[in-house]
C-alpha cells in the first residue's frame, strides 16, 4: 500500500516516543511505501506564538529567552534520540543553521517593530521545520533512508492568504507527485512538515491551527495514497467524551460527512478542511493512537456501512447565548445579513443559529471568549435601529447528536427530549439542519454531563459496532 502517516505533536514529544515512531515506520516501510507528515513538537507552536506577542510588546529579551527554550528542547531531544555519532552530528549542524535563521528573523521583526501576517507564518512554520529534522534523523539512525522536507520543499503551492491559506491543487498535485515519485524510486522515506506551504512567490504560508491534518490529506490526494492515518494520543473517534461517559465506545467506522460533523463539534481537533482533498478521490482515512498501534482506530470512508441511528453525542462547553429581539425585524429583508455582517467584521464565529417563525427574534451561540465583543459591537451598531433588546446567557453548552441514520428516522427528537426531560434538564435552544445529520441543542454548562450520559444510554451507544 501507499500510506501517508501523520503524527501529532504529542506523539513525538520525547526521545522515547520519537524512537518508537521511527521503529514503527521502519517496520511499515518493509511492506508499504510510506510518507510521514509531522506536526511541531508539543508546546513549540505556542512558544513561537508567544515570541510574536513579545515582539509586539517590544520585549526582545522575552523573545530571545523563548528561542533559547526552543533551541535547548530540540538539541536535548537530538542528543537523547540519535545513537549514531555521524547522524547526530549532521542533525545538530542542521538544527544550528535553523536556529541562526530563526534569530535573524526575530531581529528583523524587532527592527521593524511589527508582526505582519506574512512574517508570522514564516515564524510559526519553524515548529514543523525542527520536528521533521528529528524524526527523519531517527529513521536514518534506525537504518532507513529518509529526508526531511518542508511543505514548500515538497511542492505545496498555496494562495497568499497568510494564516489561513489554501493549496492551489493543480500546481500542488504536479509538484508533490513528481517530488515523491523520485524519492519513492530511491527507497527514501520523506518526512514532511505539516501545517505550511508557500505561495507562488515562495513566501511561507500556513493553513491555521490543526493544519497538519490538512497537509496530510492534501499530499495523500496528490500521490494517490491508498490510506491516510492520523496518529495522535487518542484511539479514534468515540461515541462520547470518555471523561464524561465511562462506557463510551470507540467507533470502528464512520462516513466523511459524519466525521466532519464530529470535528465541528469537538470530537477531535481536525482542521475543518481536512476532508476536502479526500472527497473527490474517496481515500479512506484512519484516526489511530500512536501509543496503542495494536488498535486499528476509526476508519473514515466515503459512506459508512454501519447504520446506527445516532453514532455519537458530542458537547462543546463554555459558550454564550445571545437572544436578539426587535419588532422591526419582522418581515424586513436583510436583518439577519446585517447582524452576521456586523459580527463577521469583528472576526466573531457564530457556532449556532436559531430564528423563530414570527421573525421577532434571532438566537445565536458564540464562544464565551467572544461574548463581550459580540454584545458590544451589536449594541454599538444595531441597538435602537433594528434591534430593540439583547438577552445574554453565559456558561452554556452545545450538545450535538450526530449520525446519518437519523435521516428520515421517525421519533429521534421525541426520544432525545424524553431522555432530557426525565433528567430534569432545561433546553434553551434547538437546531436541526435539513440534512438531519445532526440535532443540536443548548443547556447550562452544569447540565452537560447529565445530558450526555442520558442520551448515550437512551440510544444504547455502548452497544455500537
Image: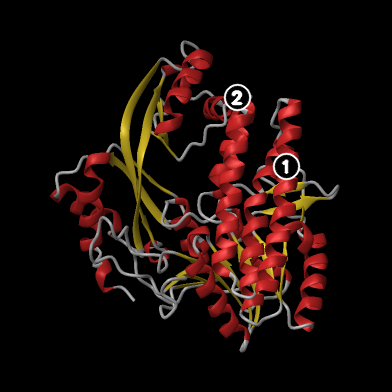
- Can you give x and y, in whole percent of width and height, for residue 172 in the image? 78, 61
Colour pattern of the rendering: secondary structure
Circle 2 packing at 10 Å, graded few (<14), some (14-19), many (20+), is few
Looking at the image, which residue is at 35% across and 61% down?
312
Label pair 2/1, CB-CB below 8 angstroms: no
Task: Say which of 409 and 45 sits in front.
Answer: 45
Task: Please tell me whether mark 2 or mark 1 is closer to you in this view.
Answer: 2
Q: Secondary structure at mark 2?
A: loop
- Can you give x and y, in whole percent of width and height, for residue 275 in the image? 58, 61
| Mark pair 2, 1: CA separation | 25 Å
Question: Which numbered disc flags the more N-terminal residue, 2 or 1?
Answer: 2
- Quadrant in the picture for the N terminus: bottom right
Task: Say which of 189 and 465 sits in front.
Answer: 189
Q: Residue furthest top?
A: 384
Looking at the image, which residue is at 37% across and 32% down?
320
Q: Residue furthest right?
A: 201
The answer, for residue 150, to whether it is visible in the render is: no
Looking at the image, which residue is at 42% across and 28% down?
371
- Can you give x and y, in whole percent of width and height, for residue 32 in the image? 63, 85
Q: Please name the residue that numbered disc 1 is placed on.
A: 161
Looking at the image, which residue is at 34% across and 76% down?
465
**Left or right: 72 as drawn, with respect to 112:** left
Q: Quadrant location of residue 57?
A: top right
Circle 1 packing at 10 Å, graded few (<14), some (14-19), many (20+), is some
Q: Secondary structure at mark 1?
A: loop
Task: Say which of 330 and 27 sits in front.
Answer: 27
**Total numbered labels placed on residues in the image:** 2
Q: Please name the residue that numbered disc 2 is placed on.
A: 57
Determine whether 381 is above or below 321 in the image.
above
- Can you give x and y, in whole percent of width and height, for residue 207 in the image? 65, 50
Q: Quadrant location of residue 368?
A: top left
The answer, for residue 142, to whether it is visible in the render is: yes
Amino acid at each position: 500500500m501507499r500510506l501517508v502517516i501523520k503524527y501529532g505533536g504529542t506523539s513525538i514529544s520525547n526521545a522515547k516516543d520519537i524512537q518508537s515512531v521511527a521503529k514503527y515506520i521502519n517496520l511499515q516501510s518493509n511492506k508499504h511505501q510510506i510518507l510521514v507528515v509531522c506536526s511541531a513538537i508539543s508546546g513549540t507552536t505556542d512558544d513561537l506564538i508567544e515570541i510574536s506577542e513579545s515582539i509586539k510588546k517590544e520585549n526582545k529579551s522575552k523573545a530571545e529567552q523563548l528561542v533559547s527554550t526552543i533551541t535547548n528542547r530540540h538539541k536535548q531531544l537530538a542528543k537523547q534520540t540519535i545513537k549514531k555519532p555521524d547522524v547526530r552530528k549532521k542533525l545538530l549542524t542542521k538544527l544550528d543553521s535553523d536556529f541562526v535563521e530563526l534569530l535573524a528573523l526575530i531581529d528583523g521583526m524587532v527592527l521593524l517593530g511589527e508582526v505582519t501576517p506574512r512574517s508570522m507564518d514564516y515564524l510559526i512554520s519553524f515548529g514543523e521545520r525542527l520536528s521533521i529534522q528529528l524524526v527523519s534523523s531517527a529513521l536514518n539512525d534506525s537504518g532507513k533512508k529518509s529526508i526531511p522536507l518542508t511543505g514548500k520543499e515538497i511542492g505545496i503551492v498555496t494562495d497568499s492568504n497568510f494564516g489561513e491559506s489554501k493549496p492551489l491543487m493543480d500546481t500542488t498535485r504536479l509538484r508533490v507527485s513528481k517530488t515523491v515519485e523520485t524519492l519513492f524510486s530511491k527507497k527514501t522515506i520523506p518526512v514532511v512538515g505539516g501545517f505550511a506551504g508557500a505561495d507562488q512567490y515562495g513566501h511561507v504560508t500556513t493553513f491555521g491551527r490543526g493544519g497538519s491534518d490538512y497537509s496530510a490529506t492534501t499530499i495523500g490526494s496528490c500521490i494517490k495514497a491508498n490510506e491516510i492515518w492520523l496518529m495522535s494520543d487518542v484511539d479514534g473517534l468515540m461515541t462520547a467524551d470518555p471523561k464524561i461517559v465511562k462506557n463510551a465506545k470507540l467507533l470502528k467506522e464512520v462516513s466523511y460527512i459524519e466525521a466532519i460533523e464530529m470535528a465541528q463539534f469537538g470530537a477531535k481537533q481536525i482542521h475543518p478542511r481536512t476532508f476536502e482533498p479526500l472527497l473527490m478521490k474517496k481515500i479512506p482515512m484512519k484516526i489511530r493512537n500512536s501509543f496503542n498501534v495494536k488498535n486499528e482506530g476509526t476508519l473514515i470512508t466515503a459512506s459508512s456501512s454501519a447504520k446506527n441511528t445516532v453514532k455519537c453525542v458530542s458537547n462543546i462547553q463554555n459558550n454564550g447565548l445571545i437572544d436578539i429581539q426587535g419588532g422591526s425585524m419582522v418581515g424586513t429583508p436583510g436583518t439577519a445579513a446585517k447582524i452576521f455582517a456586523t459580527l463577521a467584521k469583528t472576526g466573531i464565529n457564530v457556532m449556532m443559529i436559531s430564528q423563530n417563525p414570527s421573525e421577532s427574534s434571532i438566537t445565536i451561540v458564540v464562544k464565551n471568549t467572544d461574548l463581550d465583543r459580540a454584545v458590544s459591537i451589536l449594541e454599538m451598531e444595531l441597538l435602537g435601529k433594528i434591534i430593540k433588546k439583547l438577552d445574554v446567557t453565559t456558561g452554556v453548552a452545545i450538545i450535538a447528536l450526530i449520525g446519518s441514520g437519523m435521516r428520515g428516522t421517525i421519533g429521534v427528537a421525541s426520544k432525545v427530549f424524553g431522555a432530557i426531560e426525565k433528567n430534569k434538564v432545561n433546553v434553551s435552544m434547538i437546531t436541526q439542519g435539513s440534512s438531519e445529520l445532526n440535532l443540536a441543542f443548548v443547556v447550562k454548562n452544569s447540565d452537560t454531563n447529565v445530558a450526555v450520559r442520558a442520551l448515550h444510554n437512551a440510544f444504547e451507544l455502548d452497544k455500537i459496532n
